[in-house]
Amino acid sequence: MFWHRIKRLVRKDGTVSYLGARFEVPYELAGKTVRLVVDPYAERVLGVEDENAVWLGEASALDLLANCQRTRHKPDASTRMPDTPRSGPNRVEQAHQAYHGNQEA
């Protein structure tokens, strides 16, 4: 059996769309690009996998009421980018310097 794999971005609420319908996927995938595994003959979404064809979870038709009550967790500190201080001029300072040059009063 041949299944299609369709690239989709997971929305903040943990859903993806296919043929005008929305499907719930594991919430931990929010903000990531996944591939929907679709049975093209039945037009049915079976699940999601990553770009290396590793199975990430099931996909089910969106239940709006249940999705509103869904437990969501913020990403833990180990997955966030560290806050690093920036050195040098920012974009506004660069634009100001490019426009006005080095005019010192």
Image (spheres, rainbow, N blue to C red):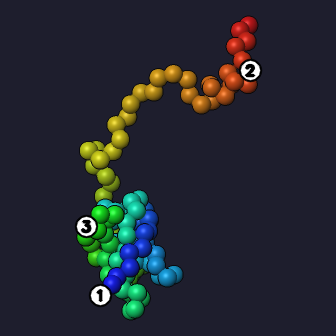
At label 2, the amino acid type is His
Q: Please, is residue 1 above or below residue 18 in the view?
A: below
Q: Are the residues at dot 1 and dot 3 in contact (C-beta closer than 8 Å)?
A: no
Residue at 31% across, 52% down = 75
Sequence-wise first label, 3 or 2: 3
Distance between the alpha carbons at the discs numbered 1 and 3: 18 Å
Q: Residue furthest top?
A: 105
In this image, 50 relative to 21: left or right? left
Residue at 72% across, 18% down = 101
Q: Are the residues at dot 1 and dot 2 in contact (C-beta closer than 8 Å)?
A: no
Q: Position of residue 5 (x, y in %)?
A: 38, 75
SS of the residue at dot 2? helix
Residue with the mark numbered 3: 54
Q: Please, is residue 8 above or below residue 100 in the view?
A: below
* Nearer to us in this view, 1 or 76: 1
Residue with the mark numbered 1: 1
Residue at 42% across, 27% down = 85
In this image, 68 relative to 53: left or right? right
Q: How busy is the neighbourhood of tag 1: few (under 14 within 10 Å), some, or many (20 plus)? A: few
Q: Residue furthest front?
A: 2
Sequence-wise first label, 1 or 2: 1
At label 3, the amino acid type is Val
Q: Quadrant of residue 105?
A: top right
In this image, 7 relative to 74: left or right? right
Residue with the mark numbered 2: 100
SS of the residue at dot 3? loop
Distance between the alpha carbons at the discs numbered 3 and 2: 54 Å
Q: Please indicate, yes or no, whether residue 60 appears anywhere in the rendered image.
A: no
* Nearer to us in this view, 94 or 71: 94
